Structure formats: C-alpha cells, structure tokens
Image (tube, helix red, strand yellow):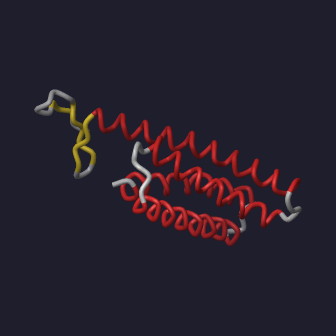
C-alpha cells in the first residue's frame, strides 16, 4: 500500500483499483463495528422472543423461531439503517435489505449443508455459518443496500 497526500491534505491509501482516504477507512470500520453490535443485539432479541413465545403463546419452536426471525429482521433493518449505515428508512433500502437477508438465509443453509456433506460435526457448520454470513451481509449492505 502506498500512502500519499491528497489535495485536501488527508492521506490516501491505494486498495486495489480504488484509493481510500483515512476518513473513509474509519467510516467503514465504524459501520462494521456498529453492524456487529446490532447483530449481537438482534440475535439476543431473536432468542428472547422465541423463548417468550414458546412459554406464553405456543409451545412450538419452529413457529416461535419464525416469529422471532421476523421481529429480529425488522429491528435489524431499523437499527442498521439508522445507526450502522446512517441512512434513511426507505422502500428501496428495505427491499434491498430483505433481498440480502434472504440471500444470507440461503447461503447459511448451503454452508450448513456443505459442512454436513463434508462429514463435519454440526457445531463446525454453525461456526462456519456464524463466520461467513455476517461478513457476506455486511459487504452487500455496505456496497449495495445503502448505496
């Protein structure tokens, strides 16, 4: 990486075909950290909604997790849009967010299936999903959903 001064005085770093300023790099890191915090929060929310649903509404875990998934997805959209990516709530971003979420769901199923097919322990599949899906969804949200 070659650092040099831009006309505005901030250092620019060459990353592939694009030049990124220190400010742009810091903003990307901030978005990533906020996205991670939001992910931890909505995962806990999902678990809480599922447990409450099972204990107080219906003792059917698949139904409870379906409801919890919808609640967590809506909350994730609102928080990620307004806080993580500092954008406005808008139909276009909602559609893109839902498409990325659906893509993440399909990819999670494929990663888990591939781990099973490889004969790995189910926990290895869960770890693989936990490591790949957040990165996949962050990149798509950062460079497509909110652009």
Report which quarter residue 114 is drawn in. Answer: bottom right
Report which quarter residue 10 is drawn in. Answer: top left
Q: Is residue 141 above or below residue 41?
A: below
Q: Position of residue 21 (x, y in %)?
A: 25, 36
Q: Is residue 9 above or below residue 36?
A: above
Q: Is residue 116 above or below residue 147?
A: below
Farthest residue to the left: give it. Answer: 7
Q: Is residue 22 left or right of residue 93?
A: left
Q: Position of residue 93 (x, y in %)?
A: 42, 58
Q: Position of residue 46 (x, y in %)?
A: 70, 52
Q: Position of residue 121 (x, y in %)?
A: 75, 60
Farthest residue to the top: give it. Answer: 9
Residue name at image x 51 percent, y 64 percent: 98
Residue name at image x 40 percent, y 51 percent: 142
Q: Toward the viewer: 50 or 138?
A: 50
Q: Quadrant of the C terminus?
A: bottom left
Q: Looking at the image, how many numbered discs can be counted on the residues?
A: 0
Q: Toward the viewer: 75 or 131?
A: 75
Q: Is residue 96 left or right of residue 111?
A: left
Residue name at image x 76 percent, y 47 percent: 48
Q: Is residue 57 left or right of residue 29?
A: right
Q: Quadrant of the N terminus?
A: top left
Q: Is residue 75 left or right of residue 44?
A: left
Residue name at image x 14 percent, y 30 percent: 8
């Amino acid at each position: 990486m070659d650092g040099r001064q831009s006309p505005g005085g901030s250092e620019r770093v060459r990353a592939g075909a694009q030049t990124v300023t220190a400010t742009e790099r810091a903003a990307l890191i901030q978005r990533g950290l906020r996205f991670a915090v939001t992910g931890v929060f909505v995962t806990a929310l999902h678990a809480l909604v599922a447990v409450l649903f099972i204990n107080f509404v219906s003792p059917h875990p698949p139904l409870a997790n379906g409801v919890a998934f919808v609640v967590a997805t809506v909350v994730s959209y609102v928080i990620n849009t307004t806080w993580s990516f500092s954008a406005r709530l808008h139909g276009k971003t909602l559609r893109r967010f839902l498409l990325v979420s659906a893509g993440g769901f399909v990819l999670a199923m494929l990663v888990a299936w591939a781990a099973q097919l490889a004969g790995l322990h189910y926990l290895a599949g869960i770890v693989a999903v936990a490591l790949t899906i957040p990165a996949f969804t962050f990149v798509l949200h950062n460079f497509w959903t909110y652009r």
